[in-house]
Image (cartoon, coloured by chain):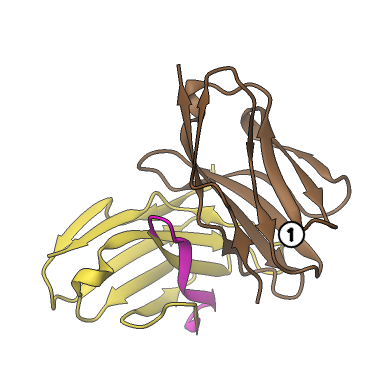
């Protein structure tokens, strides 16, 4: 059974803290994605990686960075968390060259106080 | 740029009634179309997809969707809903040229009442 896992389901951090969200997939997928989900806004792409050490900015990259040192792992980093980054964060993966079907993790609900 | 519109933010319906969730996309170029479902406190799960061929697509849990190119729509339907169908439903589209990237609608919350 295909699986995308995220390191935490719920996370509470303080303003200014550095936050790491981890995502691991076991499908040998080339592509990995980080989204944030907010009510009424759907899913918005933060960053995308199409290979190890390769990344592209999505629609809302400000305040975030990413790291992909291994094919199966994609990390989202909030360098200095702010209250407006309180959200649900979803990781997804997909195979290269396909029609875009993505497989999602369960999400991390981050609260920044 | 491609965009997806889900006009209904919430759709209440009684159990065993039919339902249609609407989705329209902006571009008339060749596209792939998807419907995802998100149950409470879970990630997104693929319901069905249109890649090519027949415009009527059948998915899991009795859902189906019809691709209408002239109206740039991909509405989701189910003839008889269950309480367990209560969830949020997202329509998504990708262009053939950049098929890795999905553009999502804002979601429709389906609320099934007994």
Residue shown at 80% from the left, 70% from the top: B29
Quadrant in which residue A112 is drawn: bottom left
- For the record, the magenta segment spans A38-56
Q: Residues within 10 Å of mark 1 (few under 14, many from 20)?
A: many
Residue B19 screen position, x and y as percent: 62, 31
**In the depicted structure, whether residue B37 falls above or below residue B6:** above
Residue B83 screen position, x and y as percent: 47, 22
**In the depicted structure, whether residue A56 falls above or below residue A29:** below
| Pick the front one: A64 or A83 | A83
Residue B26 screen position, x and y as percent: 70, 66
Residue located beneath label 1 in the image: B32
Which chain identifier belongs to the brown chain? B
Hue used for the chain lettered A: yellow
Residue shown at 36% from the left, 71% from the top: A75
- Quarter holding the N terminus of chain B is bottom right
Which chain does the residue under circle 1 lie in?
Answer: B
Label 1: state its secondary structure: strand
Residue shown at 34% from the left, 72% from the top: A76
């Amino acid at each position: 059974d295909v699986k995308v896992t995220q390191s935490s389901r719920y996370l509470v951090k303080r303003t200014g803290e550095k936050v790491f969200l981890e995502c691991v997939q076991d499908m040998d997928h080339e592509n990995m994605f980080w989204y944030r989900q907010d009510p009424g806004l759907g899913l918005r792409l933060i960053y995308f990686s199409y290979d190890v050490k390769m990344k592209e900015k999505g629609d809302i990259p400000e305040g975030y960075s990413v790291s992909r040192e291994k094919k199966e792992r994609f990390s989202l980093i909030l360098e200095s968390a702010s209250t407006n980054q309180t959200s649900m964060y979803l990781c997804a993966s997909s195979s290269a060259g396909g029609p875009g079907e993505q497989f999602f993790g369960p999400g991390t609900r981050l609260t920044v106080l | 740029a491609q965009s997806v519109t889900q006009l209904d933010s919430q759709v209440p319906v009684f159990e065993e009634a039919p339902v249609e969730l609407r989705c329209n996309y902006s571009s008339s170029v060749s596209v792939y179309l998807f419907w995802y479902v998100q149950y409470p406190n879970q990630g997104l799960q693929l319901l069905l997809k249109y890649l090519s061929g027949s415009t009527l697509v059948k998915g899991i849990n009795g859902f189906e969707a019809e691709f209408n190119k002239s109206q740039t729509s991909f509405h989701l339907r189910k003839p008889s809903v269950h309480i367990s169908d209560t969830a949020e439903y997202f329509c998504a589209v990708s262009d053939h040229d950049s098929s890795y990237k999905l553009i999502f609608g804002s979601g429709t919350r389906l609320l099934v009442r007994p």
